[in-house]
Amino acid sequence: MYNSSNPIGIFDSGVGGLTVANAIRYILPGEDMIYFGDTAHLPYGDKSAESIIYYSKNIADFLLSQNVKILLIACNSASASAYDEIVEYVGNRAKVINVIDPVIEHIIQNNHLSTIGVIGTKRTIESKTYAEKLNILNETLKVKSLATPLFVPMIEEGFIYDDISNAIIRSYLSKEEISNIDGLVLACTHYPIIKNQISKFYNFEVEIVDSSRIVANYVNKYLVENNLINSQQKGKYQFFVSDYTKTFEQIAEMFFEQKIQLQKMNLWK
């Protein structure tokens, strides 16, 4: 059985989950974290649910072998497609947390939005998870959804804060499907990396719902309520990838403000 000294395990298809890991680092500086980026199979957003479940179970096995106390699915596509299966698969070996339910809870508790947009990968948007869960809890909330599949490869390739990324952002967010909103859910953990550019497109007049801080607060609440906070002064971080990419290393070092030692691990030999 896990205890407070066990690490938090986090996985995503690539660098996106680093936004959540970084938020956890600030809120819970004493926690050890083990991060797995499945860069060999990214993006998950254009994969079948069956493939995502298969990848997720393999990664869960690896993180469980590291004795994690929390298994955080820091990927919206995997959260939408594989969460229930991973909860059943993991059982009581670790607490499984996804990145969708904390955001749903946050929006409902802060009930001041009337029309909210949701942008994410094809898999996340086609699952209709956000729209259905939000409308179950608030049937008057108008939800508009749009798949923005180019954002993930754009970010993974390092096209950030430049004319290329601005043009892609403008092309997507100008579409009628996502017009006249007062809030926007970044339903992909990659997207907070371009949050400022998205806010700028809306002239900072649309509330941007950033899952990274919301999920980190949710993790903190769970650890506090279950007496699982690691009281050490500074946590240790390990980063694993299924395929080495220079961009991953650069973005990880940008977030964590230190030299990152990436470890390549093939879980599908």
Image (cartoon, grey):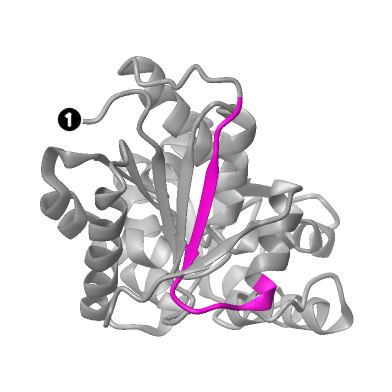
Q: In the rendered structure, which amino acid carries the disc numbered 1?
A: Met
Residue 77 image offset from top left, x and y in percent? 39, 67
Indicate whether residue 263 is drawn in magenta.
Answer: no
Judged left or right of residue 104, residue 177 is right
Q: Left or right? Give the position of 178 relative to 7.
A: right
Asked which quadrant contains residue 138, the reply is top left
On screen, residue 94 above or below 54: above
- Measured as percent of width and height from the top left, residue 12 is found at 45, 63
- Please name the residue shown 66% across and 67% down the image: 249
Q: Is residue 211 visible?
A: no
Membership of 244 in magenta stretch: yes
Residue 44 place in picture, x, y as percent: 41, 76
Which portion, as a residue range, is magenta? 234-247
- Quarter occupied by the C terminus: bottom left
Q: Residue at x 68, y 76 (%)?
A: 246
What crowding class fits label 1: few (fewer than 14 Cα within 10 Å), some (14-19), or many (20 or more)? few
Name the residue nearer the viewer: 170 or 237.
237
Q: Secondary structure at mark 1?
A: loop
Q: Where is residue 69, by image quadrant?
A: top left
Query: In the depicted view, which residue is nearer to us: 72 or 134?
Result: 72
| Disc 1 target residue | 1
Q: As drawn, is 100 to the left or to the right of 96? A: right
